Amino acid sequence: MSGSTRLGAGLLYLVLGLPLAIPAFVVAVAGFAAGVGTLVVWLGVPILALTLRASRGFATLERRATERATGRALPPHHHREASGSGAGRMFRSLGDPQSWRDLLHAVVAFPVRIATFAIAVSWSVGGLGGALYVLWEWSLPRSDDDYFGLFGLLTQSSSRLGDVLTTTVLGVLMVLTTPWVVRGLVAFRAGVASGLLTNQTAALRARAEQLSTSRRAAVQAEAQTLRRLERDIHDGPQQRLVRLTMDLESAGRRLADDPEKARSLVDEALAQSRETLAELRALARGIAPPILADRGLEAALAAAAARSLVQVSLDVTLPAGHRLAASVENTAYFVVTEALTNVAKHSGASLCTVTVSADAERVLVQVADDGVGGAHLGKGHGLAGLSDRLSAVEGVLDVVSPPGGPTVLTAEIPLAGL
């Protein structure tokens, strides 16, 4: 950011701070007073909850404005997510420490913003007016008996030339020092915001809890995958291999006395071996197909769409020229194939639309079908395992599926750190 751009951003930050400070201060003080005053009749609980929510919104605006003015990101902060609904949710929202810090900031920052606004405006405008004093001093009303301007106030003597020189020099000095004054005021106001609107310790603690949750979700997802794989192998290839063994043993016993019967048993064993190999390949495709490693996500999804029992419209837009991380591709492939499996089993849909896109921060996967709807993330359902799989890579799953359809499944897979 150049010097002039930084000066303009700083002045804008200081000037616009006052219009933002007034409603934030009024809401914080009036809401807190009204809420505390009516707690005895329980009306204060929703008033305080709404006041904290409003202060949180003003704090968000202040954080963004401070980051734009300074060109640096503020340290992290953390708001506790209020779970549940109704009165319980309101009570839990009152226990969020950062929300109370946001409210305190609205009160403390009010005089700070008034002072920084007044100094910034008077210094910059006054300096510019002083530097150009020679152009407009003639318009000032004066009389011969009065001290003449700033020079007269300082020296108790009247001199028009001395007044012009003194005011102009002072104005030029103020103009030249405006960038440093503005920078200092911005740093002061940003320091107040950083002190009250951030809480790195709480943010790091929340991050640690999130990573712990993601790790548990990853372990659970892998355990579910292993159980499903074990069940599929037991119900499919393992049973065929048992029959194959029995057929080969029977063929071995009949080889000497009944070659024709032994030949038919061998033919059946060959058929069983082919079917077993096909099932094992299908299971391998469900884990990580070779085409995904060899040719990438787009080719693997095209192959999965071709195998789907429901007609699939596929639209994949990925960065050209380079592959995504293996963990991202595996997760995106798993999301699509699992969603297509659920569509084929439960939705009764005739068309499924799969859209995959990527930007610098995330991969967005969306699977929509025209089925009967009613899908949800309840525990024990297929989508719950999909949500756990996404949690393992800090992804997010959203499902919109009203009764009667359509169903839209959206997964966001972050790229940072993967």
Image (spheres, helix red, strand yellow):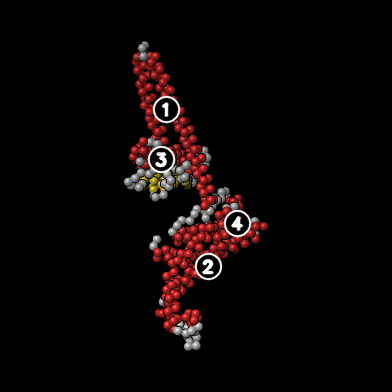
In the structure shown, which secondary structural element does the residue marked by tag 2 occupy?
helix
How far across and how far down the image is residue 356, in percent?
A: 39, 46
Judge the density around disc 3: few (<14), some (14-19), many (≥20) Cα neighbours within 10 Å.
some
Residue picked out by circle 2? 114
Identify which amino acid the numbered label 1 is placed on: Pro
Q: Is residue 143 above or below residue 416?
A: below
Task: Please identify the quadrant where the C terminus is shown.
Answer: top left
Q: Residue furthest top?
A: 257
Judge the density around disc 4: few (<14), some (14-19), many (≥20) Cα neighbours within 10 Å.
some
Residue picked out by circle 3? 330
Identify which amino acid the numbered label 3 is placed on: Asn
The alpha-carbon separation of the residues under discs 4 and 2 comes to: 30 Å
Asked if one can make out residue 404 in the rendered structure from this viewpoint, the answer is no
Asked if one can make out residue 51 in the rendered structure from this viewpoint, the answer is yes
In the structure shown, which secondary structural element does the residue marked by tag 3 occupy?
helix
Taking depth in this image into account, of 234 and 182 the one nearest to the observer is: 182
How far across and how far down the image is residue 361, in percent?
A: 41, 49
* x 40%, y 22%: residue: 244
Dot 3 or dot 2, earlier in sequence: 2
- Relative placement, left or right, of 307 versus 47 is left
Dot 2 or dot 1, earlier in sequence: 2
Residue picked out by circle 4? 46
